[in-house]
Image: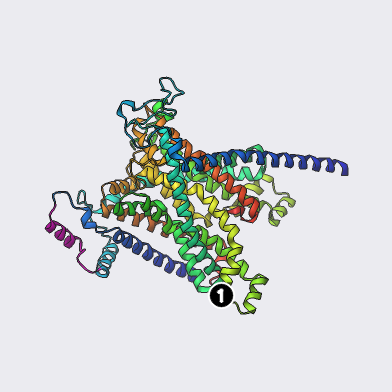
Amino acid sequence: MIRFILVRFLQTVLALLGVITLVFLLVRLSGDPALMMMTSGSMEEDLVRIRQQLGLDKPQIVQYGIYLKGLVTGNLGESFRNNRPVAELISEALPNSLRLAVSSFIASMIIALLLGVLAATKRDTIFDNGVKMLAVLGQAMPDFWVGIMVILIFSVHWQIFPASGTDSPKHYVLPVAVLTFYILPGIMRIIRSSMLDVLDSEYIKLARIKGVPEKLVIWKHALRNALIAPLTTAGLILAGLIAGVVVIEYVFTMPGLGSLSLEGMALRDFPVVQGVVLVLSSAVLVINFLVEVLYAVIDPQIRYQYT
Amino acid sequence: MEYLRDINEAKIEKRMELRRKFSRLMLIIPVVILALLILSAIFAPLLAPYSPTEIAMTERLQPPSFLKGGSPKHFLGTDSLGRDVFSRIIYGARISLSFSLIVIFITGTVGTILGIISGYFGGRLDSFIMRFTDVALSIPAILIAIILAVGLGPSFKTIVIASSILGWSGYARVIRGEAMRLREVDFVAQARIIGSSRMRIMIKHIFPNVINPLIIIATMMVGLMIIIEATLSYLGAGIPPPNPSWGAMVNDGRNYLETAWWISFFPGFCIGLVVLSCNYLGDWIRDKLDPRLRRL
């Protein structure tokens, strides 16, 4: 078990380093950041000065070292626009993104569990087909468009919920609903199909033969085992959640990491975008690592591969 | 009791038959929608009544022709710059389609090569490539696109690169599984015995046998790619204005929801319709070619 955790931990660190390097390379690939800071009145001397300030006059490998050193000490640079530390901007934006992501995740988990399990137990009925239809629609309709249509109906037409802002819980209803609808199909499908597998297994038959009440068989014996499958695709679910948060924040003009990075993109504020992307992708890797450890705790087959 | 079961089975058989007929009939709709998409992409200049980018301020914010106050000149109305929404949607098909085809070609090629190598060689190389794949699968393409868009500026090229950098991972994982299975199959073992090189085995024996799963993933990716292009263009990381990308058009209408909802509605509706058709056809092709892959 310890060996498994250690191996995975090292791999995660390596992957983290890979992502950091990728971001570094993508930045250099796209040209001279100093040129992007130039305004029409800037002189050649300004360019040289900015390059010196940013350390761009040093060799690439030295720049890479400086960049890594900054990351280790938690220094993500300063915003081009208002000269505030990027780390500070991110910590201001983080809570709202977290609220959005966590509440949508919990909501979609609950709905996915209910619908997924019921669909599996009522296989090939109208209910099952309805759930399938919901999943198909959720996967086909772009989330930003669903968001706009929801605004059109509930904010413009009926004026029940506000279309933007974060002032009250009411402001979160529409964004959370749309984000939930967006990540729901993936989770629901996995739960349904793993539930179908489990219901077919010997120990479920045994439980039934023993006379365990059907409700208990489904919601305790079967569901417990069916829950392992979504864990294996946690990475995909998380990626979808993060992409969804970025889009939904933009649709509903909410502050958060998504809005921060998109504003940064529009203004070509390099350090801000770089910072947000690094924080989000590290979060993905760290959470994936934790999920894998959890998975190994639950499923002995996984950890025995490493002993 | 026996005959009762027979009747029951006959009933079920009949119902299955009906269902099969129904799903075959249902196939026509997505086929027609996708045919329309391809035709409008190819013949956009002939089909579109107006230029997709020409600004006509006198015609701005006109409702669709079938609504009250709509002019018959503009079937789906006009946007805030007086451009014809219908014409822009037709031209937008070009961007959606060419983007998905290009990205699918790039990611499919890279993913297949990595998948075959990983599955055939196995061992440390395999675990290395697969860890790499896991990481790539879990990083959202949006993040890469945003960081590229800062440097390169939003463009077609930017989102093609952004979607390709990590997009190969889905192919690699499935193809790897197939290659692993094929490595143990008799005809590959025989090829090894008669002394075929590894390269030759991978190209001549493994590759032809992973074409089916490759086609399946590729068709299932079309819808996803169309959504990715639309999303990135909507966020401003993709196709820059005034080019008519469906996603960017939805964004154009953002500030006019109260007065001119059609600017955002129709392009998004088209995305949904096309993606729905792609996914439906993708599922059908998968069931025809290789039902084992239903889990994808």
Q: Quadrant of residue B55?
A: top left
Q: Quadrant of residue A136?
A: top right
Q: Main secondary structure of the magenta part?
A: helix
Residue B221 horizontal side relative to residue B287, left or right = left
| Closest to the observer, B238 or B196 | B196
* Residue A249 lies in the magenta-colored region: no
What element does badge 1 sit on?
Answer: helix
Q: How many marks?
A: 1
Q: Position of residue B187 (x, y in %)?
A: 66, 71
Q: Position of residue B215 (x, y in %)?
A: 57, 55
Q: Residue at x 49, y 61 (%)?
A: B109
Q: Amino acid at mark 1?
A: Arg
Extreme residue in the top direction: B68
| Closest to the observer, A293 or B178 | B178
**Residues drawn in magenta:** A42-59
Residue behind mark 1: B198
| Display coloring | rainbow
Q: Residue at x 20, y 53 (%)?
A: A37
